[in-house]
Amino acid sequence: MTSRLRHLTTLEHLPRECIERLLDRAIAMRDACAHGTRKLDLLRGRTVLNLFFEPSTRTRTSFELAARRLGADVVNFDIGFSSTSKGEELYDTLHTLEAMHLDAIVVRHKQSGTPEELVRHAMSGVSVINAGDGNRAHPTQGLLDALTIRQHRPDFENLVVTICGDIRHSRVARSDVHALSALGTGEIRLCGPAPLMPDPAEFPNCRFYDDFDAAIEGANVAIMLRLQKERMASTDLPDEAAYFARYGLDVRRLARAAKGCLVMHPGPINRGIEIATEVADGAQSRILEQVGNGVFVRMAVLGEVLAR
Ligand code: NCD
């Protein structure tokens, strides 16, 4: 048994048994709360703070639902109205919030490494959960993607998983690769135009492609990513129609993948840029299943870090 996590800042270097424990716990949470129709009291009396310095729809809502379904109190810290907009330092914000007695901080920040900074500077016993930092990590997304795949294909060692799009700026790609590698995935392929690809040294156990037709050939899972324009140099911005022609997942390309290939996307999706509407809404799409699993995975993570 690996020891219980106090914080979750990244999936990098987490052992397989720890990732499997969290996925098993997510399923146990799903069953215990009867798919969200029954409230649990595991975290009654505990307070979870959503501290989002970047916009988010599904991740923030999903953390909020997860905490409420476990009986916790939830506070959403609205950055727009907070004194951080008056230049208050991150650590002052942290200590001010800690003085209000919180049990967990769920943080999203454009600066990579912010969750670890909060762990280092926290003065109370508060747990820190990363909801996405820069292009570095999005551990609960990595877990919910792994869970979605496992529900259909638990035989990770036989799988070819293709991740396509703006890999360089994607924290989702990094956390997916960490989870998939730990679970023993047979082959992980990364595909995108050269300016949007990372340094291969960062992904030693992945195969790199710039031709999506080749990268999707025989794949069992296709994870499509958004062009993260907010993190790109303007010179790297591809023409959207040309991008879709080369890297978009359409019906013709999906036919090159293995039969029953799972189609995934962390959202928000851009129809006609990285994925065709027929595919996003098609029979092989698992995109809404990912969203549903997100709540159970976040319940599992909150339950783990806040267990007494
Ligand atoms: C992702 C994110 O914010 O990193 N979205 C999400 O959490 N659902 C991916 C993205 O923004 O493209």
Image (cartoon, helix red, strand yellow):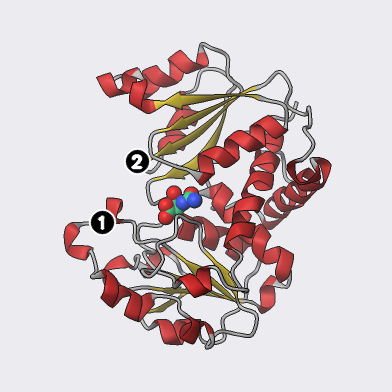
183, above or below 40, in the image: below
Q: Quadrant of the C terminus?
A: top right
Q: Residue at x 51, y 18 (%)?
A: 123
Answer left or right for 79 relative to 100: left
SS at badge 1: loop
The mark closer to the camera, 1 or 2, is: 1
* x and y percentages locating residue 153 in the rendered image: 71, 71
Q: Residue at x 59, y 69 (%)?
A: 285
Query: CA–CA distance between discs 1 and 2?
Result: 14 Å
Q: Which residue is mark 2?
A: 111
Q: Which mark is residue 232?
A: 1
Q: Which mark is residue 271?
A: none
Answer left or right for 98 relative to 241: right
* x and y percentages locating residue 219 in the rendered image: 56, 81
Mark 1 or mark 2, which has the lower sequence index? 2
- Quick one: which residue is furthest to the top in this view? 99
Residue 89 in view, yes or no: no
Between 13 and 260, the one nearer to me in the picture: 260
Q: Residue at x 36, y 64 (%)?
A: 166
SS at badge 2: loop
* x and y percentages locating residue 16 in the rendered image: 68, 57
299, above or below 202, in the image: above
